[in-house]
Image: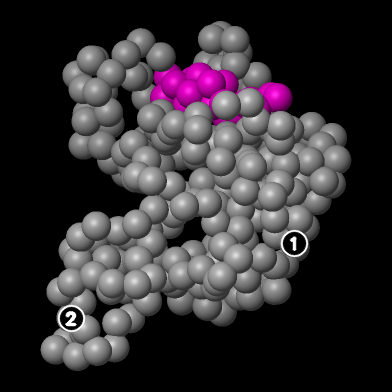
Amino acid sequence: MILSTKFVVLIPARLASTRLPDKPLADIAGLPMVVRVAQRARESAALRVVVAGDDARIVEACEAHGVEALLTRKDHASGSDRLSEACTRLGLADDAIVVNVQGDEPLIEASLIDAVARTLSDHPGAAMSTAAHAIDSPEEFANPNVVKTVLDARGYALYFSRAPIPWWRDGFADGGPNKLPPSPPALRHIGIYGYRAGFVRQFPSLPPAPVEGTEALEQLRALWHGHRIAVHISEHAPGPGIDTPDDLARVRALFGAG
């Protein structure tokens, strides 16, 4: 499929990680993790793929493998702040579409990146886009580490939560949730975002929303301030990301390196 939407992929990468030190540089079948992510992103229709790192070692590792990278400040509070600096440094126009791919997703699918970019392009009233997929187990639905979302009729996010939403009042009368609501389906949020570059530059200056702190979900800041987030519904869950040494071992095994 040919994607007419023009967009850039930015991959924020931070060296410090409490659970997996030097995570972006972790070896996966002979290549640093962040390079693996960039290679997957290059399979998308992106015009450009750039890693925004907080340490010279990240930039050097990327450049050694032909991946474009730029060095950003170390003191950014979040990946969104790092993204904002990268958009400014790259001179992206305000209406340019940027897809933020996490630096610990070496199994990210190019088709998902394309879909998130296309979703933002198709929703001119949105400042952001993201993705979700149907939840298929009550255990996942009840898990607070699984972020859920509920959409409106036009595919915009109404809310994101760690709580089980939508709450099936009658079905969960016995104290649930021990089953899934029948309709609309429960949706798990996938942590990939599309932005318009002008909004990325504006986002760090928006005051944090009280509900953002309560849920520990940064995307709620956009909704709190009246910005819309369009959501692509994926047919299946993405490949596993890497947060811990155990995650790394599993992904290395998938690459035939562990």
Residue shown at 55% from the left, 71% from the top = 152
In the shown orientation, is residue 223 left or right of residue 35? right
**Residue 161 falls in image quadrant:** bottom left
In the shown orientation, is residue 227 left or right of residue 257? right
User: Mark 2 = which residue?
Assistant: 176
> What is the x, y in percent for residue 54?
59, 35
**Residue 10 falls in image quadrant:** top right
Of the residues under marks 2 and 1, which one precedes in the sequence?
1
Q: Is residue 179 magenta?
A: no
Q: Residues within 10 Å of mark 2 (few under 14, many from 20)?
A: some
**Residue 44 falls in image quadrant:** top right
Q: Residues within 10 Å of mark 1 (few under 14, many from 20)?
A: few
> What is the x, y in percent for residue 107?
38, 30
User: Mark 1 = which residue?
Assistant: 125
* Quarter containing the C terminus: top left
Instruction: Give SS at disc 2.
Output: loop
In the shown orientation, is residue 120 left or right of residue 26? right
Magenta residues span 32-57
In the foreground, 9 or 170: 170
Residue 86 can be seen, yes or no: no
